[in-house]
Image (cartoon, rainbow, N blue to C red):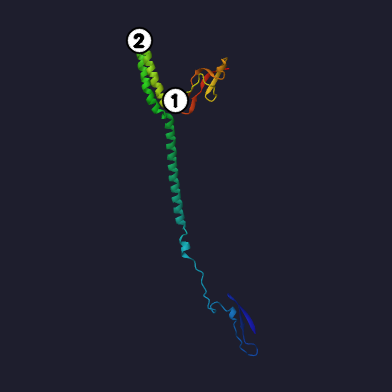
Amino acid sequence: MKLYHNTMFGKKKIEIEDDMGQDNHEENPEELPAEEMGEEVKDITVDDEETEGRKTPQNDTEKLADLNDKYLRLHADFENFRRRTNKEKSDLIMYGNKELFLKILPVYDDFERAMELMEKSDNKEAIVDGIKLIFNKFTAILQQAGLREIDAKGKEFDPEIHEAITKIQASPEMKGKIVDALQKGYMLNDKIIRHSKVVVGE
């Protein structure tokens, strides 16, 4: 008589005595358990190293608090930087011309002395010479600061640097050219800060 017994390694065929009293107990070697076939059965284990890196709730809370502290410090540093930058910009706008004014002040002092001299003296030639000296001194300071006068009279009209106020009849050689400059134009370094107001011939 043949019976089959289910095991974790497959079916195991068992033969028992039949009615005739014969003992024919056999096992199929192909279906023997792994222990009997010499195979090593390995238990499933959990690697402790995998769990060591897992943070406990307490460690997660500490990490969150640390990140929050770093964020607050970074935010405070940024706010300080922003305020300092705004202050520097404000100071630059208010005091950016400090050096220029320090150079102009001596000219202002000269004008004050010239005004006092004009009230006390009748020597017109001395007064005129003094004014010319002050003017030349002032012009030199402005040129050192990058100020340059735009050439106008007798030049070809250029709408980029000249502003035509009116047109007048002119000789053929003056057509399209500037006959007169009503107000001088100036450039600061390479930038126009005031256009020349001119009269153009036609």
Pinpoint residue 172: horizontal percent, then vertical percent. Answer: 57, 16
Of the 4 image quadrants, the one containing the C terminus is top right
39 or 201: which is nearer to us?
A: 201
As drawn, the residue found furthest toward the front would be: 173
- Residue 159, located in which quarter of the rendered image? top right
Amino acid type indicated by mark 2: Asn
The residue carrying pointer 1 sits among few (fewer than 14), some (14 to 19) or many (20 or more) residues within 10 Å by Cα, namely some
Look at 38% across and 25% down and name the residue there. Answer: 103
75 or 152: which is nearer to us?
A: 152
The residue carrying pointer 2 sits among few (fewer than 14), some (14 to 19) or many (20 or more) residues within 10 Å by Cα, namely few
Q: Earlier in the sequence, mark 2 or mark 1?
A: 2
Look at 39% across and 28% down and name the residue there. Answer: 99
For the residue labelled by badge 2, is the local secondary structure a helix, a strand or a loop? loop
Return the mark for residue 123: 2
Disc 1 designates what residue? Answer: 147
Where is 185 relative to 66, above or below? Answer: above
Pinpoint residue 201: horizontal percent, then vertical percent. Answer: 56, 17
Amino acid type indicated by mark 1: Leu
For the residue labelled by badge 1, is the local secondary structure a helix, a strand or a loop? strand
Of the 4 image quadrants, the one containing the N terminus is bottom right
16 or 107: which is nearer to us?
A: 107
Where is 79 relative to 58, above or below? Answer: above
- Residue 127, located in which quarter of the rendered image? top left
Pinpoint residue 29: horizontal percent, then vertical percent. Answer: 58, 81
Q: Is residue 104 visible?
A: yes
Return the mark for residue 124: none
Look at 40% across and 23% down and name the residue there. Answer: 140
Question: What whole-number distance in Å separates the C-alpha atoms at marks 2 and 1?
Answer: 33 Å
Q: Are marks 2 and 1 in contact (CB under 8 Å)?
A: no
